[in-house]
Image (cartoon, grey):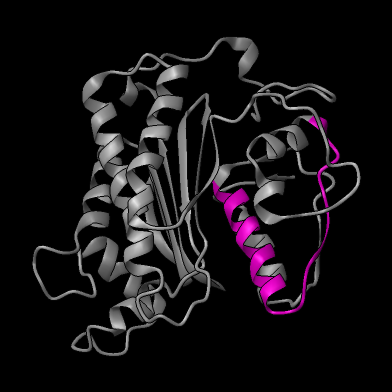
Amino acid sequence: MELTIESIEEVLSHLYVDGARGLDLRSARFIDPFALLLLDLALRDAREKGTPLHVEWPTLPAVRNWMTDMRFFADTRVVSRDLSLPEAGTALQPIVTIESEDHVSRLVEAFDRRLSERFPLDDAPRRRFLRILLELCQNIPQHSNATGDVPDPHGIAAMQDYKDGVLLAIADKGIGFRKSLALRGSLGDLDDAAAVSSVVLDGISRFRDPGHGRELQRIFRLVRSWDGTVAIRSGRAFLYHGPLGGEIYDVAPFPGVQIALRIPRRVFGIGEPPADERGVAAEGGSGFNE
């Protein structure tokens, strides 16, 4: 079983459509950062609603080690016996919390440092990536609780490298695109799909000032030009665009905005990884979460 950008919707449908109060993840052999952040937020959402989830965690040591390295258990405050596994050093960038605009610059510097420590990066794509990261992180304190109705939107971000590229994930459980655009008034009553389309494809924001908005539109177009993958989720709408095209899908309702960018390694000037770092980690191993 794999929990990825493409498959995490099955988990959310199980929870938010079927009404399940538990998850059996014991057979999971792979989890990407986007799925990990959604799982993190789902656990928090359930706990805040007074209906905490019962989860059977992955039994494969390599996956559990990676989840530990990504600070998943620390961020979700999961307390369970048999979770104190040794650090394997497999996380490129563990989960960090985006609390305010004051923290964004330091967060971006930390991401840049960890990426640069692992790879010799070309300057131009590195600067473009940092600009993308800055804009995405700033969106959380600026928009995730624009109505003031969410006690804790809990913005988080994480990053991991794979043989096909670097995967950046940023997520919150705030008000989402539809409620944010509703503050503008003149846009009318949009559903989630129309709101996602308006923000990402048309460059519209809740501000009328032409100086605002278009950040996600620019990011979407840039990653497309790199033949990367863009996944943007809000409410009941999920925009997925990969090298072969894309579409907006109807999905299970979930609060906030969640974004994943899969950027090919060649964009950063990074070569292919060695052959022994490309396969699924062996049982009991501590290799990359491939």
Quadrant of residue 237 in the image? bottom left
The boundaries of the magenta stretch are: 34-61
Q: Position of residue 193 (x, y in %)?
A: 38, 74
Count of number-bearing discs? 0
- Residue 98 location in percent, x, y? 45, 53
Q: Position of residue 200 (x, y in %)?
A: 28, 61
Answer above or below: position of 102 versus 189.
above
Is any atom of residue 71 visible in this view? yes
Whether 213 is among the magenta residues is: no
Looking at the picture, tell me which residue is in the foreground, 104 or 8.
Answer: 104
- Horizontally, residue 25 falls left or right of residue 16, namely right
Locate the N terminus by quadrant. Answer: top right
Position of 18 relative to 74 (above/below): below
Q: Nearer the viewer, residue 118 or 287?
A: 118
| Lateral position of residue 158 relative to residue 148, left or right | right
Identity of the residue drawn at 38% across and 29% down = 112
- Picture residue at 10% right of the left edge, 63% below the top: 211
Q: Quadrant of residue 176?
A: bottom left
Residue found farthest to the right: 81
- Indicate whether residue 43 is drawn in magenta: yes
